[in-house]
Image (cartoon, helix red, strand yellow):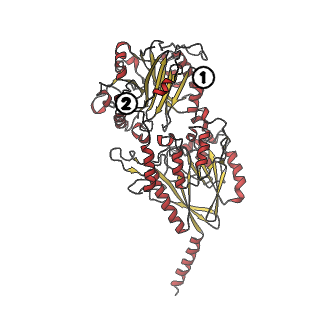
Amino acid sequence: MKRILPLILFIIFASSIYSRSSKLHLVFTNNIHGAIHELPARFINPEFSPLLAGGAGAYTYVTNLRKEASEAGDFVILTDAGSLFQGTQLGTDDGGTKIMKWMNWMAYDAFVPGVRDFDQGVENLERLKKESNFPFLASNLKGVSGIDNYKVIDANGIKIGLIGLITPFLFDGLVPENYEGVEVLDLLETLNTQIETIRNDVDLIFVLSHLGLPYNREDEYESFIKKASQEKLKIKNAIELAHFTNDVDVIITGGVSKGYDTPWVDPNTHTIVVQNYGNLTGIGHLILNVDKEKKIIKDYTFPTERGMMVNLFTDNIWPDLAVQDSINGWVDSISSLHNRDYTKQISEIEETDCSSDNTISNFNKFDVSPVGDDNLLDIMTWNMERFPLKGDTTMKAVAEIIQDLNVDIIGVQEVIKIGAFSEMMSWLPNYDFVISKQSSFLEQAIIYKKNMFTVLAQDEPFAMDDYYFAGRPPLVVDFLYHCGDVKKEICIVNMHLKCCGDGLYRRQQSMKQLHGFLKEKSKNGKDNIIVVGDWNDQLQDTGIYQSFSPFINDQENFLFVTSRIVNDPNQQSYPSWPSFLDHIMIGRGYFDVFEKEGIVRSVNLDEWIGGWEEYESIISDHRPILLSIPIGK
């Protein structure tokens, strides 16, 4: 009996401890970017990729979890931290409506808008809110109707105040017309106001934010702490927000596609910060153990040995068949630019005067000579290296150069800040631009003269599976060139291929894909094709080291015009190596005019603006490459 009594007492004690504890399953997604379809997990094994179950697998996981939690007396909260539909045609073709239907099926508890959720304007975001069955939260966002400051969730007697916050750098990632009338308030001031509002009505405070948990979070934190001790900093990510608030228990964040298997916990405030991987390659799941009497988070555990990131492989999680059928049907409905008929559009475009107008002179710092010729079609490719490299200085320099060069079309790579790029283009009234809708980062853009070209259609093929293109699917734009009574269709393709690491393999695979796409377009009679970009490799490579074999071996349909100059050391497009990485390729529709009168050359801007060191420090480490051909002006 003496031995049994302590055991009974222990069981009674353990039972009372258990009864005081409740599990809160925090399930979270972010940066889905329209990727709810099944997709090969090429990042695991490019050759033999396991299949990701996508939105149908996520539905299975959350449905089963809710059932298990309900039976155990636990609670599930499901949130998304923004950038929902941009990234695939599945998301962008209808402005996110299909993605919102899926979210309603998933029964999300809350959503905070991300930067790219404004890609189709404020009205589109407001429409998505009306279509949703859950609140949109962003307490520091003004000018968008239907957005709430917070939501109170009763998790089996534990009241959680969920406050929404959007990034203060919203406008950096958008063209101005997409955020007209929008204002973003101070992060910390707004958060403190909301905490004061709900503090007495809730037990725990969570923040659902589109701020981002950065890559290399430990290094970023150390750097931040050093700077914070010397100056007052503007909060730019979730790590920094966690450091400056003592009242927040958990921050669920998005804005960066990098996920972590373990939470970030601030060493001083002990705020827990979580972020899932982007593109729905998995789903985040953290199990919070909550003391029901003290109303505090005691600790947390993980659903897997790996941690809180649950990969959605079909081998592990079978997709819900009804949801899968719906998503597959949506994917099948996506159209292509292979053989689109623009006859009606073209008939409605009136004759225009396409003569050059160089009367505007907003800049005069550099003595840059014009390279555009009114009797030729001038097309340039230009990697602008993380534009704007030096902020306003870069923007003014590039605007002046574009104005002075007087070329007709420029394919641009590496736009980091869409807002800054849009502002720069507003200084150039003779030009307009098209920018990527589906790229993950380092956007591509095509600048064109408004009086000479009209955009017929834009597409980014392979956005549904862009691993080989490093998350930057080619930007394909069908233009109508019109001068006087001359009207001609022209297809411009702008690319930025994978560099470094496994770049050779991914370039080779991406070129097989692109060749198939353009070959089909050419077969349909659309062979006025010009491909520009940073190809990140050289034409001179041979054998297994050649990236562009599908095009080089198809001389009947495609020609690299830059082959004329790649061996000229004075025309290297990337002098820092030195090498020739930026190329222009034409379709057979331009073979004859190029052979007769075509000109291809590097544009050595460094010679006009103070030398290579000056050019590289404020603009780019790449030189532009120019193609000039007659087109019937």
The x and y percentages for residue 459 are 46, 34
Percent from the top left, x then y, of residue 60? 46, 58
Mark 2 burial class by Cα count in 10 Å: few <14, some 14-19, many 20+: many
Q: Quadrant of residue 545?
A: top left
First of labels 2, 1 by sequence position:
1
Q: Which mark is residue 427?
A: 1
Q: Is residue 360 above or below residue 325?
A: above
Q: Secondary structure at mark 2?
A: helix
User: Residue 463 vs residue 221: left or right?
Assistant: left
Q: In the image, 229: left or right of 343? A: right
- Residue under label 2: 521
Tell me which corner region of the image, top left, top right, bottom left or bottom right, holds residue 598: top left
Residue 358 x/y as whole percent: 56, 13
State yes or no: discs 2 and 1 in contact (Cβ < 8 Å). no
Looking at the image, residue 630 sits to the left or right of residue 274; the answer is left
Question: How many residues crowd around disc 1 within 10 Å: few (fewer than 14), some, or many (20 or more)?
Answer: some
